Image: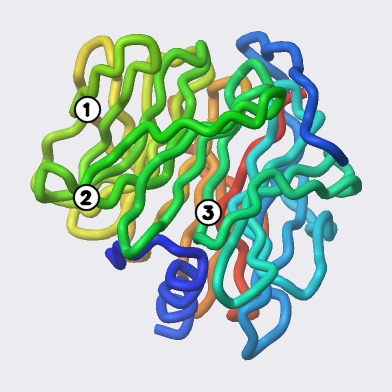
């Protein structure tokens, strides 16, 4: 896997696969199980240029609708716990990307960070007042946390490794992330109260992009441990790891449905990338988007309702 995780690099990697308001106010914590709303996703918009827009689509399939488009790179959508707000990163210049939020209908876009760095992959805490994201400074990627009400920013990781793709646990006490601090890429967690770091996966292959199940008992992640890039699930109680998808094509960017029954992901096949879902019990697959253009759909995020 390409490990430089800036938006530009990730977009370039996907292209290679395809060709072969003010700060949000705190919101109520969502109950589990939640209702399954729309899926937000990003898509290349203009052929030959580094431009992406954010769309939404019904999880059963259909034509995606534009949510955020401004001729820039808009990527990594993430819903708040009550589904009323969206966070995303946007590259408004060639030298940096910052974190933004908007209302669920795409209006009221507000810049949350304003720094000369690449700041990407925002994820909400369940209280609606915290966002975790990754920031690249001098070639190093670490995880940061921002309180929207106070504006305070805390650095959660500080190492020479690449720490990336953070995700809050549903109770807001832990942040999971991918890191190569152990040599290979594995899933790690950090307890926000004690500061304790825990290595969740120990496979010699690359494990990254963790996504907590809504009840906090499992983590879905992408991994090369099966020979291809596939989606796997780690049961945090039993320690058991199971393969959720398995094919000869790349499957990445897992995200759980709010009711905990399905996982959405991106599958790169036939010269493009589309979003699919899979039932975690029956392994029944549903193709959500069906574009044949090389301008595929990536990084799905499932809206709670």
**Identity of the residue furthest to the bottom in this view:** 48
Tell me how far mark 2 sits from mark 3, CA to CA: 16 Å
Q: Nearer the viewer, mark 1 or mark 3?
A: 3
Vertical position of residue 301 compared to residue 3: above or below: above
Vertical position of residue 116 compared to residue 114: above or below: below
Identity of the residue drawn at 56% across and 66% down: 96
Ranked by sequence position, the earlier of labels 1 and 2 is 2
> How did the renderer colour the structure?
rainbow
Mark 3 sits on what residue?
Answer: 119
Mark 1 sits on what residue?
Answer: 200
Give whichever of 156, 245 is nearer the camera.
156
Q: Which mark is residue 161?
A: 2
Q: Quadrant of the C terminus?
A: top right
Q: Quadrant of residue 97?
A: bottom right
Identity of the residue drawn at 19% across and 33% down: 201
Tell me how far mark 1 sits from mark 3, CA to CA: 25 Å
**Residue 225 seen in the current view:** no
């Amino acid at each position: 896997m390409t490990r430089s995780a800036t938006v530009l690099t990730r977009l370039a990697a996907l292209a290679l696969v395809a060709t072969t308001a003010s700060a949000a106010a705190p919101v109520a914590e969502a109950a589990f199980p939640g209702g399954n709303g729309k899926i937000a996703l990003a898509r290349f918009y203009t052929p030959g240029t580094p431009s992406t827009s954010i769309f939404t689509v019904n999880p059963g399939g259909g034509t995606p609708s534009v949510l955020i488009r401004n001729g820039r790179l808009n990527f990594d959508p993430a819903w708040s716990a009550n589904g009323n707000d969206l966070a995303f990163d946007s590259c408004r210049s060639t030298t940096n990307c910052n974190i933004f939020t908007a209302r669920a209908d795409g209006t009221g876009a507000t810049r949350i960070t304003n720094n000369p760095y690449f700041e990407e992959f925002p994820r909400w805490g369940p209280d609606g007042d915290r966002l975790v994201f990754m920031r690249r400074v001098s070639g190093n990627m670490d995880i940061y946390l921002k309180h929207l009400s106070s504006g305070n920013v805390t650095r959660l990781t500080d190492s020479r490794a690449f720490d990336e793709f953070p995700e809050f646990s549903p109770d807001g006490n832990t942040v999971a992330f991918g890191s190569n601090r152990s040599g290979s890429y594995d899933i790690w967690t950090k307890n926000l109260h004690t500061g304790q770091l825990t290595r969740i996966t120990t496979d010699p292959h690359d494990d990254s992009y963790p996504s907590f199940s809504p009840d906090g008992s499992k983590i879905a992640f992408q991994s090369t441990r099966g020979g291809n890039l596939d989606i796997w699930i780690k049961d945090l109680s039993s320690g058991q790891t199971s393969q959720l998808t398995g094919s000869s094509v790349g499957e990445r960017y897992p995200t759980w449905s709010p009711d905990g029954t399905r996982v959405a992901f991106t599958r790169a096949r036939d010269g493009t990338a589309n979003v699919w879902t899979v039932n975690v019990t029956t392994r029944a697959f549903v193709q959500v988007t069906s574009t044949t253009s090389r301008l595929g759909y990536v990084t799905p995020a499932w809206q709670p309702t």
